[in-house]
């Protein structure tokens, strides 16, 4: 049958430190992974069309730092993004990777490059992602405050 000890973890919820028990390991993960999953779910729910050069302007939903990426195309490299930045999209001839779009940051129009399409969306979509992230941070702070007060 094999070792199933890694299927379960033992611990407690931060909100209830005195209550301990076992839980499925697959049910927990890093906060970053949870935020990414939530954002992906919002993308699917909104059914927002994929940005194209016809869209012309989109906003960065998340930070993206391509440093360290092994990029085969030296002419069209990935573009660094900061969440909230406006990005103008441009047509790009030739073979563009299917998960990438071409454009530039409005703040630095001289720097052009490829952007992961899942990292950009409409202004409205950016606001939804931002509000969700703020709510998670507020909930975490509230949890930590109540944990400190209980000890």
Image (tube, grey):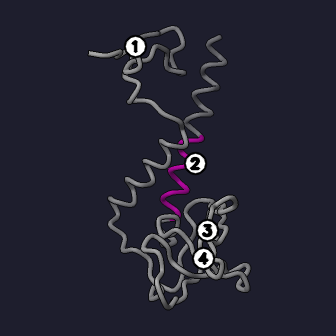
Say which element carries label 2: helix
| Residue at the image position 62 percent from the left and 71 percent from the top | 78
The residue indicated by pointer 1 is 22
Where is residue 75 shown, x and y percent of the image?
64, 82
Is 75 drawn above or below residue 60 in the view shown?
Answer: below
Say which element carries label 3: loop
Residue mark closest to the camera, 3 vs 2:
3
The residue indicated by pointer 3 is 71
The residue indicated by pointer 4 is 73
Say which element carries label 4: loop
Disc nearer the start of the sequence (4/1): 1
Residue mark closest to the camera, 4 vs 1:
4
Disc nearer the start of the sequence (4/2): 4
Task: Mark 2: give few (<14), some (14-19) or many (20+) Cα within 10 Å.
Answer: few
The residue indicated by pointer 2 is 134
Read off the magenta span.
126-137
Quadrant for residue 40, please give it. Answer: bottom left
Is 78 drawn above or below residue 8 in the view shown?
Answer: below
Where is residue 135 shown, x and y percent of the image?
53, 45
Where is residue 146 shown, x and y percent of the image?
60, 22
Disc nearer the start of the sequence (3/2): 3
Residue mark closest to the camera, 1 vs 3:
3
Real-space Cα separation, disc 2 to disc 1, in angstroms: 30 Å
Task: Mark 1: give few (<14), some (14-19) or many (20+) Cα within 10 Å.
Answer: few
Q: Main secondary structure of the magenta part?
A: helix
The answer to whether the residue labelled 3 contacts the one labelled 2, judged by CB atoms less than 8 Å apart, is no
Real-space Cα separation, disc 4 to disc 1, in angstroms: 48 Å
């Amino acid at each position: 049958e094999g070792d199933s000890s890694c299927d379960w973890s033992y611990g407690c919820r931060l909100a209830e430190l005195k209550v301990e028990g076992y839980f499925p390991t697959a049910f927990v993960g890093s906060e970053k992974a949870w935020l990414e999953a939530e954002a992906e779910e919002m993308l699917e729910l909104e059914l927002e069309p994929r940005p194209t050069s016809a869209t012309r302007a989109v906003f960065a939903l998340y930070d993206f730092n391509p440093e360290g990426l092994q990029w085969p195309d030296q002419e069209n490299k990935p573009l660094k993004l900061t969440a909230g930045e406006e990005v103008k999209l441009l047509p790009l001839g030739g073979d563009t990777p299917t998960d990438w779009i071409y454009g530039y940051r409005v703040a630095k129009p001289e720097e052009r490059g490829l952007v992961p399409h899942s990292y950009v969306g409409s202004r409205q979509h950016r606001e939804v992602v931002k509000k969700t992230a703020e709510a998670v941070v507020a909930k975490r702070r509230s949890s930590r405050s109540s944990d400190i007060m209980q000890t």
